[in-house]
Structure formats: C-alpha cells, structure tokens
Amino acid sequence: MTNGTILPLRLHEVCFGAGSRAIIERISLEIESGPSTIILGANGAGKSVLMRLMHGLLQPASGRVEWSGTERSGAPRKQAMVFQRPVMLRRSARANVAYALKIAGVPAAMRAALVREALEGVGLSHLASRSARVLSGGEQQRLALARAWALHPEVLFLDEPTASLDPSATREVEAVIRAFDAAGTKIVMATHNLGQARRLGDEIVFLDRGRLVERTPVEQFFSQPRTAQAAAFIKGELPWTG
C-alpha cells in the first residue's frame, strides 16, 4: 500500500492542555514503520488527544510534531484516521469512498477503480449502492475503513474503532485492520480492550495522566509490566475505558 515516505513520526516534548488542565505532558516519542502500535491508558490518560496531535488535527501548546524530511513538499501526506463514530455522508457507500478520494485530490479517472478495490477489501462490495446512513454500526465502521483504504495510507490512526460494536462486528473490523497491517500500512490504535491490544498489537505505548510511562513489546507488557501504573491497569485496578 505504501512507498514508505513519511515515517518516522517524531514528537519532541509535546504538551497540550485545555484551560488550566494539562492533558499531554512533555511526551517524546518516535513512531516507526513496521510493528503495530497500541496506545493504552486509563480514562482521561490522553490517548485520543495524543492521536489527534500525531495526525495533525490538534496543534501542541509546546513541543514539536515532525514527519520524516523525505516527504515531498506540497504532496498529500499519506495518513488517515478513523474514529469511534464515523461520520457518514448522505449518499451511497460507493459515493462516500469516492468523495474521500476527491477531497484527497485523486484524479476523477482513477477514482472508480480505487472505490471498487476499497469496498472489496472491507467486504462491502454488495452494499456499494446502499445509503451509508442505513448501514449497521459495524458496516459503517468498515466503510470508514474503506475510505482510508482507498487512499493507500502509510499510516492509519484508529481511535477506539470497535468500542461501540458487538463481538461479531468487532471481529469483522479487526479482520480489516489486519489486512491493512499485512499490506504494509503502519497501524497506530487507541483501544480500551485489553484482549484486542493483544490480538492486534506488536507494541504497547502506555499513558498515565498525560505522560508516557511505558513503551514495551505487547507480550512483555502483559507478562512483565515495568511500572506499577501498568500493572494496576492490567489488573483492572484503574479505569480503562476511554
């Protein structure tokens, strides 16, 4: 899916707050291509805000967020983000994907083939003509992933992508996420689901009250957490939704 042009992504002493409340405190982090990165932390730890800072939806109050210098000046950045509750346009599933391509500046002559590929990739070809807003929650989330798929991103940010879905829909979405990973897209995902973190993650970035506490391979994180905060979180002694 990708030529590997924009990673690594580097955060240098990044801070962000709301009013007088600090949400992200002096986080330095480098996101490389390859292994899937799962962001975990208790409610209010700053997971979603950190992802929005990475994606560029928010600007840090201080510090820097920098993509690789090999990115071509003026070229569209090869990244996409899917949220817990995706916004569906009042048009067909096919047209939702086509519109994402239009906004990204993809030439009209190329869009139809990319739309077909994306819908097939997420298992929604049979619903291409159906209104996006009447799809089930799981189907809408796969459609949101199709909009990302069509862009062939190097990096895909996922913010709690299955939090409101039932187990069957969750399995379908996870299968699509694995397909992105297999195709070479870097996955960066926030989740409250510890089982999902084990299934989909290669490494864990653990936040506690806006600070980066631990970055560890997934199996080591669950079997031998390095910090008391992580150990308490795994045991359910800290709230872990959000």
Image (cartoon, helix red, strand yellow):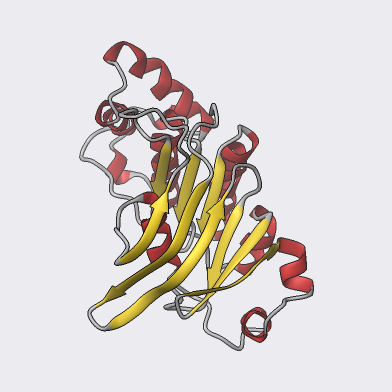
The residue at 41%/42% (across/down) is: 80
Q: Is residue 181 above or below residue 125?
A: below
Residue 164 can be seen, yes or no:
no
The answer to which quarter of the image holds residue 23 is: bottom left
The answer to which quarter of the image holds residue 4 is: top right
The residue at 43%/44% (across/down) is: 139
- Depth order, front residue of 164/18: 18
Q: How many marks?
A: 0
The residue at 33%/51% (across/down) is: 56
- Quadrant of the snapshot with the C terminus: bottom left
The residue at 68%/82% (across/down) is: 231
What x and y, as percent, mark residue 182? Answer: 65, 36
On the rendered structure, is 197 left or right of 7? right
What x and y, as percent, mark residue 112? Answer: 36, 17
Q: Is residue 211 above or below residue 110?
A: below
What x and y, as percent, mark residue 75? Answer: 34, 28
What x and y, as percent, mark residue 11? Answer: 46, 57
- Depth order, front residue of 16/229: 16
Residue most extreme to the top: 109
Residue 230 can be seen, yes or no:
yes
Q: Is residue 218 above or below residue 122?
A: below
- Depth order, front residue of 99/68: 68
On the rendered structure, is 97 left or right of 217? left
Q: Is residue 117 above or below residue 86?
A: above
